[in-house]
Image (cartoon, helix red, strand yellow):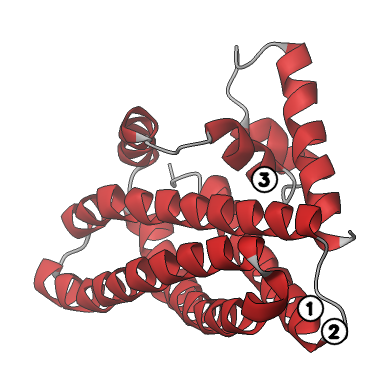
Amino acid sequence: MAAHLTGVRVAHRAILADIGRLAGLLAALAAAAEPAAPARAGAIAGYVQRFNEAVRGHQREDRILWPVVLDAVPDAAEAAAGIVGFVADHEALDVLQAECDAAAARFAADPGRHAGSLAGLLAVQRDLLAAHIEAEEQYVLPVIARRVPRAAYAAAQARIRQADRCADPAWSRAWLLSHATEDEARSLVPAGGAAPVVEERQPCAYAALASAVFTG
């Protein structure tokens, strides 16, 4: 039975959608006649930093999944050579995201002065993430779908959940689900998950923050 790839596909969709709108938002703020209000600048900075942490979590998932992929392909040496490029992307993203986090903090302190530098870093990150995810979807996900047994993939996902070091898992979960369809969300929320009240509060809190960031 094929691996269930809904989670990774929704994560890719969420990453691409948000880096696009963050880069667009900061470009608009950098060109605006007036700087963002302090409260909104702080909300934007916090959102950028949480987004970067969510992307780092996705990168940690890749590091657990890649050995599973290598075990499943007939030519592991060729596959390993291809994965080297993904590792290089991750290393570049690590550096870029650290710079973005620092730029976001400076933007929160002085939005008029630092909107341009944060906008530039987010645009670079947008382009790198777009190329990286396009390559993953073209070369890696088809291999997982064809060759990795569902049980092996599920076991890797369990290891990923155990190793999750996200600083704000509730935010990351609500952010991810905000980009999922109803059917996808049902498949991503495990049976016996959070209590209904918690399930309702998390998306509401995320939606309020996203509104403060993207609509002011």
Badge 2 crowding class, 10 Å Cα cut-off, few under 14, some 14 to 19, many 20 or more, is: few
The total of numbered circles placed on residues is: 3
Badge 3 crowding class, 10 Å Cα cut-off, few under 14, some 14 to 19, many 20 or more, is: many
Q: Where residue 113 sits: x, y (%)?
A: 66, 79
Instruction: Looking at the image, tell me whether mark 2 or mark 3 is earlier in sequence order.
Output: 2
Report the residue at 56% width, 66% height from top: 106
Report the residue at 44% width, 39% height from top: 166
Q: Amino acid at mark 3?
A: Trp
Q: Are marks 3 and 1 in contact (CB under 8 Å)?
A: no
Where on the picture, by quarter, is residue 213? bottom right
Q: Amino acid at mark 2?
A: Ala
Depth check, front residue: 23 or 133: 23
Q: Which residue is mark 3?
A: 175
Q: Where residue 192 sits: x, y (%)?
A: 60, 11
Q: Which residue is mark 2?
A: 32
Q: Is residue 13 left or right of residue 106?
A: right
Report the residue at 42% width, 71% height from top: 99
What is the CA distance from the residue labelled 2 to the residue labelled 3?
28 Å
Badge 1 crowding class, 10 Å Cα cut-off, few under 14, some 14 to 19, many 20 or more, is: some
